[in-house]
């Protein structure tokens, strides 16, 4: 999709994945506890969803909690889970107005029961919506996701439901948590780190990467537009020659 920004036409990435990083450092800089940063970070997800939708983005996939983040203090993990709870609840009030679809990827078996209920309710409420699809990666790790998919496929082969020949790239994609979305066109990571931290390793094979030093709570529409302009400067060759 093309969109006019500052009097110029830009291609809008259909799917943007974001590693929202830097909440803790952002809070520390202000003499506040890390969880205050997570709260501001959650509020910002809501704002960026709106901005992305206004710009014409169809899929936004945000990394909110990794399979490795359980290593943090009990207090921080509990704080993040509580913010998430409030955040998911608040979606219920505006999901209809915004025609938003909310989905979760990751291993849900380790999430609290009430959070899982909220996720199911949001999915049920939004499944006919045609606005932005917001996917929240929760207890998500790409290696864990691939391992789970391989296990299911192996079981099916073992039961004779599937032959090894039937295992193709498309088939593997269809068994990942992200089966319902196209691969990300653009990956954004905030707060200066240049690494993937176990995010969407399979899906990001041909995405463009945008890294910024701005901390997630400070990442706003202007920054998003900067990332989209950067994306427009890239030549996506997919291994070919242009
Ligand atoms: C990202 O911010 C949010 C989560 C990983 C839950 P961080 O909490 O990683 O913030 P920094 O990187 O410590 O500043
Ligand atoms: C990646 O951020 C995970 C999320 C944003 C949820 P981290 O802050 O956990 O990543 P590392 O530890 O710096 O690699
Ligand atoms: Mg971090």
Image (cartoon, grey):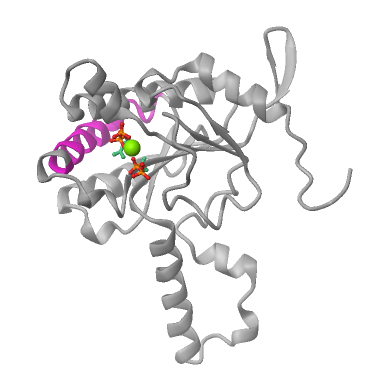
- Front residue (pair 28, 38): 28
Residue 93 in view: no
Principal secondary structure, stretch drawn in magenta: helix
Q: Depth check: 94 or 189 in front?
A: 189
The quadrant where residue 173 appears:
bottom right
The magenta stretch is 77-97
Residue at figure coordinates x 43%, y 84% from the top left:
155
The spot of residue 20 in percent (x, y) is 39, 34
For the C terminus, which image quadrant? top right
Measuring from the top left, give residue 147's x and y in whole percent: 42, 70
- Does 66 appear above or below 7? below
Q: Is residue 86 magenta?
A: yes
Count of numbered marks: 0
Side of 237 relative to 12 (left or right): right
Residue sitting at 44 percent across and 23 percent down? 48
Q: Residue at x 75, y 41 (%)?
A: 236
Q: Is residue 118 shown to the viewer in this render? A: yes
Residue 135: percent from left, percent from top:
42, 42
The residue at the far top in this view is 7
Ligand 3, what quadrant? top left
Q: In the orientation shown, which residue stands out farthest toward the right?
A: 242
The residue under the point 46% across, 74% down is: 150
Quarter of the image for the N terminus: give it. top right
The image position of residue 121, as x and y in percent, is 28, 45
Instruction: Say whether residue 129 is left or right of residue 35.
Output: right
């Amino acid at each position: 999709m093309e969109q006019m920004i500052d009097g110029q036409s830009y291609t809008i990435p259909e799917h943007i994945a974001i590693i929202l990083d830097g909440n803790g450092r952002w809070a520390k800089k202000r003499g506040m506890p890390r969880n205050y940063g997570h709260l501001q970070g959650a509020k910002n997800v809501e704002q960026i969803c709106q901005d992305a939708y206004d710009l014409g983005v169809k899929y936004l996939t945000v990394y909110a909690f990794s399979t490795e983040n359980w290593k943090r203090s009990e207090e921080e993990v509990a704080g993040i889970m509580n913010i998430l709870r409030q955040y998911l609840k608040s979606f219920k009030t505006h999901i209809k107005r915004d025609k938003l679809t909310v989905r979760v990827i990751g291993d849900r078996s380790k999430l609290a029961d009430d959070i899982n209920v909220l996720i199911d309710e949001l999915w049920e409420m939004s499944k006919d919506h045609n606005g932005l699809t917001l996917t929240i990666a929760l207890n998500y790790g790409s290696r864990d996701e691939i391992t789970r998919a391989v296990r299911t496929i192996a079981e099916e082969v073992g039961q004779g439901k599937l032959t090894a020949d039937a295992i193709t790239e498309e088939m593997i994609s269809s068994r990942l948590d992200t089966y319902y979305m196209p691969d990300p066109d653009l990956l954004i990571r905030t707060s200066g780190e240049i690494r993937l931290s176990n995010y969407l390793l399979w899906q990001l094979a041909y995405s463009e990467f945008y890294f910024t030093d701005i901390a997630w709570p400070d990442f706003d529409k202007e920054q998003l537009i900067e990332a989209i302009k950067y994306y427009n400067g890239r030549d996506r060759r997919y291994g070919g020659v242009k």
